[in-house]
Image: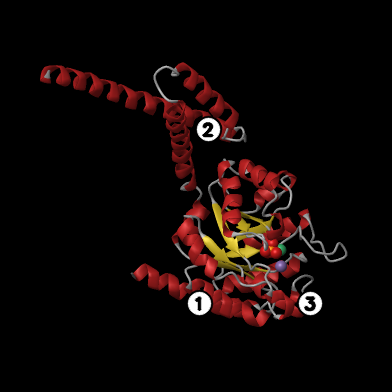
């Protein structure tokens, strides 16, 4: 009897080794397919095919294995191929690596208004140690009569100014066609609060930027729950780009009935999201405050609460800004914030 058990065990050990080898071979093949899809800018996930495989195998195993068992095994197999690939890709974008390594400061005007304006601001900010230059050129404004941004020429001005001072550019994308018309120059794309649940845009941007893993700042919709926000980020990730930066920028609550805040700063969510997600979380004090005097204190509080960076609006002539004038601070104010963040980074490095 004991001998029979030993014999069965030997056979099982042999089968287990063969199963592992076949699974590894299967994973390699799926990764090849995912890589090819990335190169062709195709969606990596094909749920229809996954379901078709599971149904076929459930049928094949119907007299020996329970359908739920087959499904569970295969869902895990599919997940493991996709996850391994994403981890590898996430590490590949140099800017995203930098963002993950230390707290960052992104600053610049709400909108690029002219070549001179963005050059002046870029120069002043870079002298304060800021490395990331923001500037919107497709502005989602509440009224169609408000300044809408310079469109594509604004991207050229932003790109030149950023390059002139050795900075990375950051700008909001509102349609995937913009990537074909000049946005490929932009180092970090931003998806704004109002588009945070525009799933077709999220998927298209994720697909289009997958090969490069270009960092994407996703701003929280001002009406969105945390789970909805994280699910929106997943749209970009599952379309192939894992370099997503989550940005809290204030939410709409009862405060807006009579408080001075444009939105309610969702500072506490920094800590919650950091527990739920491994993505970097940055904070935008400008849009949540809506008022210049609150920008610095909110930004410092966000850093103290563990934010991985700040994105703030700055203008050389705040009173003359064509959009969001009330919340713009001078580059010299941003300089104080740069110093604060630098000190935190130094302290963290010394730990
Ligand atoms: C912006 O950053 O320029 C902007 C419009 O912000 P939000 O999408 O958060 O309103
Ligand atoms: Mn703005």
Look at the numbered disc 2 and give the secondary structure of its residue: helix
Q: Give the foreground label among 2 and 1.
A: 2
Foreground residue, 148 or 342? 148
Res 121 → quadrant: bottom right
- In this figure, which residue is indicated by the disc labeled 1? 339
Quarter of the image that includes the N terminus: top left
Q: CA distance from mark 2 to mark 3?
A: 49 Å
Marked residue nearer the N-terminal end (2 or 3): 2
Q: Are marks 1 and 3 in contact (CB under 8 Å)?
A: no
Q: Around disc 1, counting alpha carbons within 10 Å, would you say few (fewer than 14), some (14 to 19), or many (20 or more)?
A: some
For label 2, the residue is 34
Residue at far right of view: 145
Which of these two is toward me, 241 or 66?
A: 66
Instruction: Assign a secondary structure to mark 1.
Output: helix
Identify the residue position indicated by label 3 in the image.
320
Q: Residues within 10 Å of mark 2 (few under 14, many from 20)?
A: many
Q: Earlier in the sequence, mark 1 or mark 3?
A: 3
256 relative position to 333: left or right: right
Quadrant field for ligand 1: bottom right
Along the line of sight, the residue nearer the viewer: 50 or 122: 50
Dot 2 and dot 3 residues touching (CB under 8 Å) = no
Task: Please indicate, yes or no, whether residue 126 appears anywhere in the rendered image.
Answer: yes
Q: Is residue 299 left or right of residue 13?
A: right
**Location of the C terminus (image quadrant):** bottom left
């Amino acid at each position: 009897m004991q001998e029979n058990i030993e014999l069965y065990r030997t056979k099982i050990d042999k089968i287990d080794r063969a199963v592992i080898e076949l699974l590894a071979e299967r994973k390699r093949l799926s990764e090849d397919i995912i890589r090819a899809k990335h190169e062709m800018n195709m969606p990596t996930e094909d749920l229809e095919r996954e379901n078709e495989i599971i149904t076929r195998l459930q049928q094949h195993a119907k007299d020996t294995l329970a359908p739920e068992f087959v499904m569970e095994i295969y869902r895990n197999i599919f997940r493991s191929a996709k996850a391994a690939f994403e981890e590898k890709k996430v590490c590949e974008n140099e800017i995203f690596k930098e963002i993950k390594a230390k707290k960052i400061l992104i600053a610049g005007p709400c909108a690029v208004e002219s070549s001179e304006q963005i050059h002046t601001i870029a120069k002043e900010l870079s002298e304060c140690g800021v490395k990331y230059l923001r500037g919107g050129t497709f502005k989602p404004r509440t009224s169609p009569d408000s300044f809408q941004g310079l469109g594509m020429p604004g991207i050229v001005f932003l790109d030149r100014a950023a390059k002139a001072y050795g900075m990375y550019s950051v700008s909001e994308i509102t349609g995937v066609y913009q990537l074909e018309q000049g946005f490929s120059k932009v180092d970090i794309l931003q998806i704004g609060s109002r588009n945070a649940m525009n799933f077709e845009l999220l998927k298209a941007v994720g697909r289009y930027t997958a090969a490069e893993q270009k960092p994407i700042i996703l701003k929280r919709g001002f009406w969105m729950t945390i789970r909805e926000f994280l699910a929106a980020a997943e749209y970009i990730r599952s379309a192939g780009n894992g370099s997503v930066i989550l940005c809290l920028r204030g939410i709409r609550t009862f405060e807006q009935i009579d408080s001075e805040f444009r939105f309610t700063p969702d500072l506490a969510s920094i800590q919650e999201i950091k527990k739920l997600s491994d993505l970097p979380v940055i904070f935008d004090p400008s849009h949540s405050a809506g008022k210049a005097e609150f920008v610095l204190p909110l930004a410092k509080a966000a850093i103290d609460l563990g934010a991985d960076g700040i994105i703030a609006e700055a203008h050389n002539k705040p009173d003359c800004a064509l959009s969001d004038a009330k919340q713009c601070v001078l580059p010299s104010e941003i300089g104080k914030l740069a110093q604060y963040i630098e000190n935190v980074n130094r302290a963290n490095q010394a730990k």
